[in-house]
Amino acid sequence: MIRKLFTEITEEIFLDKIKDILGLALKAGFLVKGQDSVKRELRKGSRLLILLTSDHSRNVASLLEGYRRRGRCRVIVLDFLTRAHVEEVFSMGRTQILGLPLENGLTSRIEMLVTKGVAAHEQDQDI
């Protein structure tokens, strides 16, 4: 799992950029929203980049751990994003989990944004 304190980017800039990327993914139909939808996609064999809010539940984290260990998903906890942000900024309800196909170009843009300046040893740690 990747967990970062965003030292090189402010919360406001980060939210603007992530909102743009997630908005594109939503319009294109690539964004998977909510625990049940993400779980369904993972069970179908989809490989996903999972975005968790900073206030995600332990149940959601434990649901993903087996998939993460088997390489079925990569997980990023977004320190600046809460369930309230998702509801308020993205109009997606109070969801704590979002997913994007790993093969999608928007996924790499999110990973670059989140991991900008991050040392490799700080990535892919346990939830």
Image (spheres, rainbow, N blue to C red):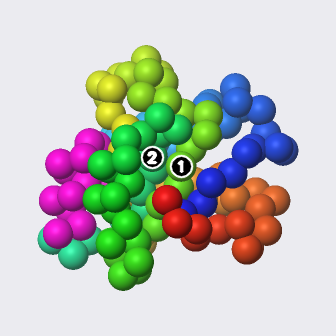
- Residue 77's label in the rendered image is 1
**Can see residue 80?**
yes
Seen from the viewer's position, the closer of residues 29 and 68 is 68
Residue occupying the point 49% across, 59% down? 127
Q: Considering the numbered disc 1 on the image, is that residue within a helix, a strand or a loop? A: strand
Q: Is residue 39 left or right of residue 24?
A: left
| Residue 55 image point, x, y percent | 47, 35
Counting from the top left corner in percent of width and height, residue 107 is at: 50, 60
Query: What is the span of residues highlighted in magenta in the rendered image?
Result: 29-43
Q: Is residue 9 above or below residue 74?
A: above
**Three-letter residue code for mark 1:** Val
| Residue 80 x %, y % | 61, 34
Q: Can residue 37 be found in the magenta stretch?
A: yes
Tag shown at residue 52: 2
| Residue drawn at x 34%, y 58% as measured from the top left | 62
- Whether residue 57 is situated above or below residue 11 in the rendered picture: below
Disc 1, disc 2: CB below 8 Å?
yes
Between 34 and 70, the residue placed more toward the observer is 70
Q: Mark 1 Cα within 10 Å, few/some/many (few <14, many 20+)?
A: many
Q: Residue at x 40, y 71 (%)?
A: 68
